[in-house]
Amino acid sequence: MALKVKAQEKLQKIGKYEGTYRYIMMPELHTSLSQEKVIKEAALRSGVSKGIMQACWDAAGEVIKAWATEGHSVALPGLGTMRFGIRAKSVAKVDEVKAGLVTSHRIIFTPAVDLKDELASTAIQITCYDRDGKEIKRVTSTDPGTVEDNENGGGSNQGGNTGGNTGGGGNTGGNTGGGGSGDEDESYGD
């Protein structure tokens, strides 16, 4: 099995490379798997009936939701942990603190070491496209993910996303967070 990535030639509109074309890599995401398909596969792998697996799945989901909304960091077996957090505006005076300062509720996922190791050891298959969308090259890599960074004086990038869902860090799409508008501070409750 390999992770599929596309490298698309795109015009850079801001930053160091503004006005030049650069190849930007991003994961090729497959369609979402339905809960029914996941439960059916889990039932097959565990040897229990689909009905029992559905009941366990539903119960686990309710327990995770209940505990996480009480402020606990909840283990997701084989995957990592999840917890809820918030993004809120900061204020200078205690009299200005109010619930209306909360701008978003967030789910923060921290992957387990085994999951991160599995991802890091998975081969990557890259398909390169030029600026017109024409496929021009395919690369398959089974290297450990170490890439020389000649532009920043050496070093390496071991596996990429270290930011999880806590905003700012990370280099994959989805729930990796973002920078905010400058007037927001992140606060997380455990």
Image (cartoon, rainbow, N blue to C red):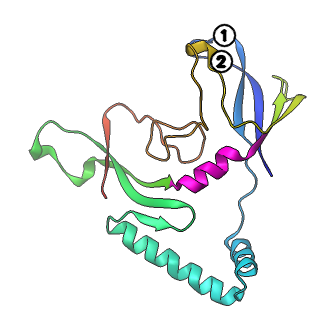
Asked whether 123 falls inside the magenta stretch, the response is yes
| Dominant secondary structure, magenta | helix
Q: Position of residue 78 (x, y in %)?
A: 57, 65
Left/right placement of residue 60 relative to residue 6 reads: left
Of helix, strand and loop, which one carries label 2? loop
Q: Position of residue 8 (x, y in %)?
A: 77, 28
Q: Which residue, given by chain and number where applicable, does mark 1 sit on?
A: 19
Q: Which residue, given by chain and number where applicable, does mark 2 sit on?
A: 12
Q: Residue at x 74, y 36 (%)?
A: 143
Q: Residue at x 70, y 68 (%)?
A: 34
Is residue 170 in sight in this rendering?
yes
Q: Residue at x 69, y 37 (%)?
A: 144
- Residue interval drawn in magenta: 111-124
Q: Residue at x 66, y 49 (%)?
A: 119
Q: Amino acid at mark 2?
A: Gln
Of helix, strand and loop, which one carries label 1? loop
Q: Are marks 1 and 2 in contact (CB under 8 Å)?
A: yes
Crowdedness of circle 2 by 10 Å Cα count: few (<14), some, many (20+)? some
